[in-house]
Image (cartoon, grey):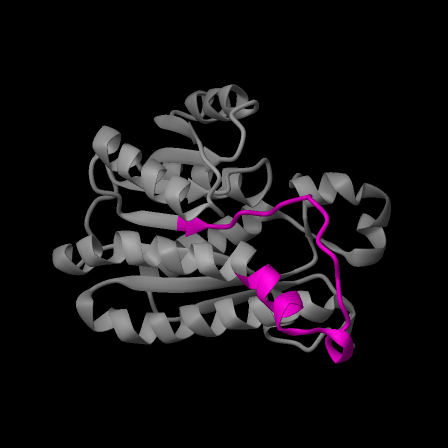
Amino acid sequence: MTSSAGKVLVVLGAGPGLGMSMAHRFGEEGFRVALVSRSDRRHESYCASLATAGVDSRSYPADVTDQGDLRRVLGEIEGDLGAFDTVYFGPVSTEPMTIVPLPEAGADDVRAPMDRVFTPAVTVVREVLPAMIERRAGALFFGGGLSGKVPMPMLGNLAPASAALRMYVLTLAEAVKEHGVYAGTLTIGGLIERGDLYQALAEQAAAIGTIDPDDIAATAWEMYVQRDRAEAEFSALAPAL
């Protein structure tokens, strides 16, 4: 591996949980960080936290589920910081989405979560991958749910989007490794501590199970360095699941 000094990490869906843990962990290795989230109301505190740790960062408001806004912000970041080495895609919304049991779900019910999760992920890849292939360098990380790997009927129409994203990333990883590019998925079962969903579901956290985002970010860094696996699973859920 070459030195990480000056490389750029883009965090799409920056929040107080895993997004910031990824920023800190890669920042420790000399990465500059671009933080992107829908609202900029917490950006000042995020950047201050990174500055205290000696990490150079910038922040950008954008709705990454909007393809036009996503393309805009990626272009803005590249204009400000230059080519980015690594992208982490992990937007999480606390906005409610109706869960429809799969036996009752129609095509539109299944498509809605796809539009919120899967479609933006593919857009990210289409925007950043060509330059990575040209440089024969770069990495793509995606945060995904354990329902993409383990059947969870209680999540109904939400589960297929997780499954589609997981298999997309695993297949992408095989397709791009010969070009010097790495892709990996972080498959998560449980509430990420400090994250927005964790705070929204604080009363149920003990029953659901929680995961330290610093542990996930540490594993992501190992995956980045070693590049010998395309998936890491983190589950705090009951073994029966």
- From the top left corner, tell me how far across and down residue 229 is, in percent: 40, 71
For image coordinates 77% across by 76% down, the residue present is: 104
- From the top left corner, tell me how far across and down residue 222 is, in percent: 40, 57
Residue 50, above or below 24: above
Residue sitting nearer the eye, 207 or 76:
76
**Residue range highlighted in magenta:** 88-114
Quadrant hosting residue 95: top right
State left or right for residue 63 relative to residue 183.
right
Visible in this render: residue 102? Answer: yes
Quadrant hosting residue 157: bottom right
Residue 205, above or below 115: above
State left or right for residue 17 relative to residue 217.
right
Residue 71, above or below 105: above
Residue 68 shown in magenta: no
- From the top left corner, tell me how far across and down residue 123 is, in percent: 37, 56
The furthest residue to the left: 134
Quadrant hosting residue 228: bottom left
Number of numbered tags placed on the structure image: 0
For image coordinates 53% across by 58% down, the residue present is: 115
For image coordinates 58% across by 66% down, the residue present is: 111
Q: Quadrant of the C terminus?
A: bottom right
Residue 91 shown in magenta: yes
Visible in this render: residue 140? Answer: no
